[in-house]
Amino acid sequence: MYEGAIQDLIDELGRLPGVGPKSAQRIAFHVLSADPADVNRLAGALRKVKELVRFCTTCYNVAESEQCRICRDPRRTDEVLCVVEEPKDVVAVERTGEFRGRYHVLGGAINPLEGIGPDNLRIRELLTRLSGGAVRELILATDPNTEGEATATYLALMVKPMGIAVTRLASGLPVGGDLEYADEITLGRAFEGRRAV
């Protein structure tokens, strides 16, 4: 619809999750009319995140060094491991202030319709961590939707023979919802009332 650079920007913004054509157009025109210093700050932040941010070598959360701040924290217990789908879910759980263990980020959920199976997730790495013997409880905090439930069920079947207690977040989270959108109280109650799988 537009010429050159502005259309290229609209197209690129439209590729972002949750940004439709109208939003992409609004953002592009906002960038066009914004102060150059603001645009440079945004461009710098985008470059910086691609240069500095990587995945933690232990839990696969986002980090700016080899390990994330949670894996480096000696005050956390190694006996409880919380499995989540994405790094944004770690932030959601941390906001509750209810959990003092460690995390493992799978990098998604089992979704056969999208071609995502167990081999596409960090399940092998999880099983390696669990074989160390330090973990006594595994909390399955995958999203309460079809894919999250399938992933939790698969993990429970894989882990139960290891003699580790496997729990799932309790009710309080809406079915079909995402952890990142749950408020702190609801997510906190779900942690307090988790149940065996």
Image (cartoon, grey):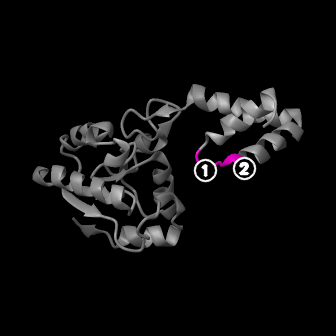
Residue topped by disc 1: 18
Image quarter of the N terminus = top right
Point 17% across, 49% down: residue = 158
How many dots with numbers? 2
Q: Which quadrant of the figure has residue 33? A: top right
Q: What secondary structure is the stretch in magenta mostly built from?
A: loop
- Callout 1 environment at 10 Å: few (<14), some (14 to 19), or many (20+)? few
2 and 1 marks in contact (CB < 8 Å): yes
- Element under disc 2: helix
- Give the residue type that dot 2 points to: Ser
Of 189 and 65, nearer the camera is: 189
Residue range in magenta is 17-22
Q: Which quadrant of the figure has residue 145? A: bottom left
Residue topped by disc 2: 23
Q: Does the magenta stretch include residue 52?
A: no
Point 23% across, 51% down: residue = 155
- Give the residue type that dot 1 points to: Gly
| Horizontal side of residue 29 vs 101, given as left or right | right
